[in-house]
Image (cartoon, grey):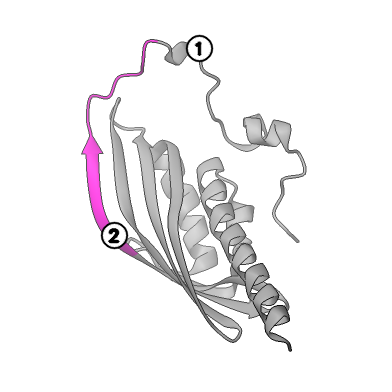
Amino acid sequence: MTAASERLEQFMARAEIHDALYRYCHACDRRDWAMMKSVYHPGAMDNHNTFDGPADQFVDYLAVRFEQAFGLTQHHITTINIEFHGDTAYVESYFIANHRHKDVPHHDSQTGGRYVDRFEKRNGKWLIASRQVAVDWTADFENLKPTDVAHKHRWGAFGDADLSRQRLPEHRPPA
């Protein structure tokens, strides 16, 4: 393999890893649990502090937890560091996660941390094989009131009711 083709292959791998990280956040916030499962290899493990076990069970756990606890969430990926070792990549991604609580009106919480992942290339696909979450900070925000123009906004929703589905009907988890 030439140096140029090696660089191109690594560039494509980075893009695939970034795509999986962004799909994870989108799936989480739109509650598309099938899409979320698609970012993990079969048999992958996830240690999210409140859950430590198989990733497919983590997604099922999250679906119940989000339905019970949160009206809305928003997850952001920021800095992404990737180190390749053949068909394995060690990936550290900084995140900020916002959660609007159902049980207390006008209460949001925010968490900043890092997803520390091992991605593997299997059957030509780069997906998460193992994830650990490191929390760096948390904050609670009480008595948040909507802005004066809040009633004029189009609000996010879940499933087919969300604008992203209306604009992008082909947006489904990869087979």
Residue 86, quarter of the rendered image:
bottom right
Q: In the picture shown, does residue 54 fall above or below 22?
A: below
- Comparing 19 with 132, the one in front is 19
What residue type is disc 1 on? Lys
Residue at x 72%, y 45% (from the top left corner): 171
Mark 1 vs 2, N-terminal side:
2
Q: Residues within 10 Å of mark 1 (few under 14, many from 20)?
A: few
Image quarter (top left, top right, bottom left or bottom right) of the N terminus = bottom right
Q: Which residues are magenta?
A: 134-148
Does the magenta segment cover residue 143?
A: yes
- Comparing 76 with 46, the one in front is 76
Does the magenta segment cover residue 168?
A: no
- Comparing 105 with 127, the one in front is 127
Badge 2 marks a residue whose secondary structure is strand
Name the residue tied to disc 1.
Answer: 152
What residue type is disc 2 on? Val
**How far apart, in angstroms, are the residues tagged by discs 1 and 2?**
35 Å
> On residue 135, which mark appears?
2
> Is 97 placed left or right of 157 in the picture?
left
